[in-house]
Amino acid sequence: MFLLPGAHANHQTQVGESIGLLQTDSQKKMVRIGKSIDNLQTTDEAGAAASALLSIAKAHGQWTNEEKEQFIPLITSLVSGFEGHLSTEHDADQTHWTTEEAKEVGCHTEASENFLSGEVSTANEDLDERKAKLKSCHAVDKAWQDYKAARECELPQADVAFGDMSTHDEALKAAMAALAAKVSTYHSEVPVSTILPTGDCSSDQVHLEDQMCLVRRLHRWTCEAQAACSTTVDLASTKVALRSSQDNRRASKLSFKKVICHVNEILGLTTANGEWQQDLGDAAKNAPATCNSIVLDASDLVLNLEMPQAVHCKVDPEVSVYPSTTDTVVCSNWVAQEYQSWGSDYTAPTACKASCDAMPTPTNSPHDD
């Protein structure tokens, strides 16, 4: 039913009294319309009832003031029921959207927790430590090269003057001090160590690049899980369906309002403070037709269907560049991104020492290197 029990009974009484007083050739039609208004179930039925009222209003001819007054409860009941039904549908759809939206937000939240405090976050912290360790190793390597250069004499020893030797010794001491400082910094970088790597910095580079592969796997798997969750929820399809229902309701309301407007013009009725009343002198009946220009407010019956945005996994530039020992282009991109901007205080790797899968798949433990 359109109306609440109390309001329904009140309108039913008013409609019945109105029909009883309408002594016209259209009385039988009015009785049928009155009964249909009393039992309307859908907006389509309300629209049909409004069209029937318009047909009767046109066919009846001249309306007396008394007849107009008796017509008012029919219009009031019809408008109240129609708008109440639309509002109920609108609220139900908005509640449905809110429920489905919460499921989508849950997909995002689970992924975000992994990025902010879960295994992706932990893996990224380890990656940052490995980057600092490798860079520190290459700072030691550069300091060692500078120290070796400082030890070499440019002229044969017999031809070196005392002042030149003194200057050379000072430069050698400075290079040695710089080397010692870089070594100390390397030892203190996490993971803390007490010895330098054997040979060169390759072992630290392997640890870093293997860690990048782990980060890449965890990142991709977390985002794939979020995508699978979102696919199950399928909020986009829900939005399409609800927007279609919204547009149909708005179209139905606009059409209904125009029909009621035409009825009122024929009867010479207007509204004041939400109540129907006669327009003295039938001014509305004689006024230029305005019903076809009626429009709805922009927000009338419009649902809030804003899609929640994922904080993570929208794009993944963090893992789109990675090391590879088999693909020279992929490796070049990695080397350029990670190593070539270090500056003159460091040596820098020129090749990759580990390979990440181009398409990580969860066939192994995410902690496998």
Image (spheres, rainbow, N blue to C red):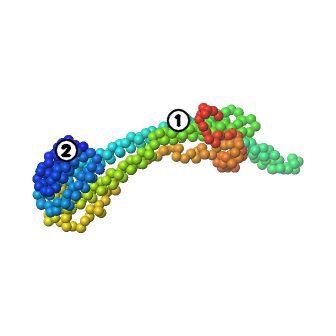
Query: Relative to 261, does residue 361 appear above or below in the rendering?
Result: above
Which residue: 53% across, 44% down? 313
Residue 265 in view, yes or no: yes
Q: Position of residue 202 (x, y in %)?
A: 72, 39
Image coordinates of residue 74 in percent, x first then y, are 18, 52
Q: Name the spot of residue 290 as percent of width and height, x first.
A: 26, 64
Compared across the picture, whether 119 is left or right of 38 comes to: right
Q: In which quadrant is the C terminus drawn?
A: top right
Residue nearer the viewer, 202 or 171: 202
Q: Quadrant of the N terminus?
A: top left
Q: Nearer the viewer, residue 341 or 182?
A: 341
**Which image quarter: residue 210?**
top right
Task: Say left or right for 270 vs 125.
Answer: left
Q: Is 54 placed above or below 132 here?
A: below
Query: Label 1, on which residue?
Result: 118
Name the residue carrying label 2: 8
Disc number at residue 256?
none
Residues 346 and 184: in front is 346
Residue at screen point 56% across, 45% down: 316
337 vs 27, left or right, is right
Instruction: Please give the name of the residue rendered at 24% of the width and 59% of the height, measured from the top-left corner.
Output: 261
The kind of residue on which mark 2 rests is: His
Q: Mark 1 belongs to which amino acid?
A: Gly
Q: Residue at x 66, y 48 (%)?
A: 333
In front: 92, or 336?
Answer: 92
